[in-house]
Amino acid sequence: MEIQEDLEARKEAAEMSMPSSLSGVQPKFETKGLKAGFRANLVLQGIDIKFPPNKVTAVMGPSGCGKTTFIRCLNRLHELTPGATVEGEALLDGENIYDKAVDPVAIRRRIGMVFQKPNPFPTMSIYHNVAAGLTLNGVRDRKVLDHAVENSLRGAYLWDEVKDKLKQSGASLSGGQQQRLCIARALAVEPEILLMDEPCSALDPTATAKIEQLMVSLKQNYTIIIVTHNLQQASRVADYTAFFYLGKLIEFNETATLFENPKEELTERYITGKFG
Amino acid sequence: MTTITVSGRRDSWRRTFDRLMKVLILLAVLVAIVPLVLVVGDVLLQGLPAISWDFLTKLPPSPCSVGQVGSQCTGGILNGIEGSLLMVGLATLVAVPIGIAAGVYFSEWPESRISFLSSFTNDVLAEFPTITIGVFIYVLVVVTTRSYSALAGAAALAIVMLPIVARTTEESLKIVPTSLREASMALGIPRWKTIFSVVISTGRAGLATGILLAIARAAGETAPLVVTALYSSYPPTLASVVPGRPTASVPYIIYNFGTAGYANWTTTAWGAALVLVTFMLVLNLAVKFFIGRKFSGARAEI
């Protein structure tokens, strides 16, 4: 009986872990039974989700639903917090990044991250901020660095604004520029996946619009996962949207479908602003 | 309208009270500053006549009484300056790397039990009477090598400096935002490199401040040197360190010459005091400069 129930729950989770329109698509990134928390407090209750390649997938939900913990599990940053616990699997191209043989440092080079608040290195110039991921990993070749810096800054739509002041401190830029600098810094290591944890929550509408535009153009080369509590933002930039509530994945679908025709009552109530 | 009048009256009382408190605080500040001004002023007045180029480059004079004149009655504190530089320098070489390493450990691994215990020990050590540190080194080094030496003096000073460097390193690394560590780790930069290139580099002004404060403290220490380095009338040589010979220091000259009772020695002690106070002043100004830079750095972070 219990086994039967368990099997059914698993089947349901597997069905929900990817929108039906994507069946047959090889996921770029996938979690299986991902549980995480802090000491005795379990924040994520077991997440099964598949992220399609070269798409923007939004993870949204009310405060405390575990979305930030979730995204921090995806590049193994969560485990650096004292007392953090993780269980389950996260498969990057089918390879479990939580396998004992896997070096988290190597994983983080393949999965870049942009944080809530812009956090350029205050003691480094704009150039060195972008190059940091390379120089601190031993790249010395000036040509390689110059090339990477220019490409990444162009990729982050920042090149034209800073090309004449690459030697200035990264902290001298405006908030929106700093966030794009952080995106360029993440791009310079040439990751496959870009995680963004509410990247616009500290920015004004103009800067937000620029970053959103940027996300849409970046998905040609990257798989993007963005955490947001801004519904409009999810609907503007995301191809797919996952709704989290109390550490569980409630619903996952194409963004338009999820917003216009949610299957779950909880999703509908969240979208219509009845809670959250 | 009535309410406004009432609140106006209360406002005026509040303003009077505000002014009263301000005056009281100002008075407290004056009381606190008076001894400092008196000490510095006295040192300046009494010490200035002794200061000359010779004072910094000649060896101490023979004892002379009032009215006695002759070249043997004037001299300087070269032995003390060189001895202090040698011992504080050696102590800095030892205490700074170890202190920074300990501070990094306290700040970056606060959860570890070793970190907790040694951080606590560090606090106790920082409050330790320095004479006990001196006696400890006396037993450990002076008794074993059968000689007072610059080595023993430097060892005692290193122990005095260590907790200061460790504590200021810890404090200045703790205020480096976690978000910077995470930004670095998220780029696939290993933890040790993150600490060296991002964390320490961001908190470097604080580290420099700590080192300067520790040097200032060590340069002024007298008690541990009395039982470890003692005094010599000659400038230190390599032999003062190994195998070890008694070595002079500026604070010891102040202590010894100041209490001897000969008029020219008293003048020498005042001059030595002025030299030491000036050194402290310069170091503290350097600290102010670094702190100023630290704050401007913090502003830029926001």
Image (tube, rainbow, N blue to C red):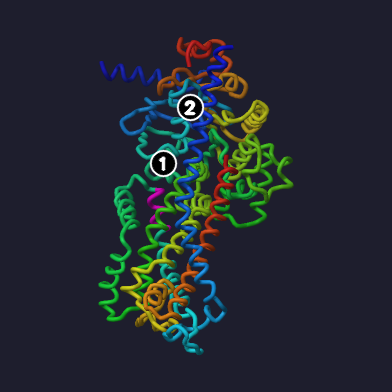
Range of residues picked out in magenta: B100-108
Main SS category, magenta section:
helix
**Label number found at residue A80:** 1
On the question of residue A140 being in view, the answer is: yes
Q: On the rendered image, what quadrant is the N terminus of chain A found in?
A: top left
Q: Where B44 sits versus A114, above or below?
A: below
Q: Where A120 sits versus A218, above or below?
A: below
The quarter of the displayed image where residue A161 is located: top right
Please tell me how crowded label 1 is: few (under 14), some (14-19), or many (20+) other residues with Cα within 10 Å.
few
On the question of residue A23 being in view, the answer is: no
**Label number found at residue B287:** none
Q: What residue did someone put label 2 on?
A: A50
Q: Where A243 sits versus B213, above or below?
A: above
Q: Earlier in the sequence, mark 1 or mark 2?
A: 2
Name the residue located 42 percent from the left edge and 37 percent from the top edge: A78
Q: Chain of mark 2?
A: A
- The residue lying toward the viewer, choosing from A52 and B152, is B152
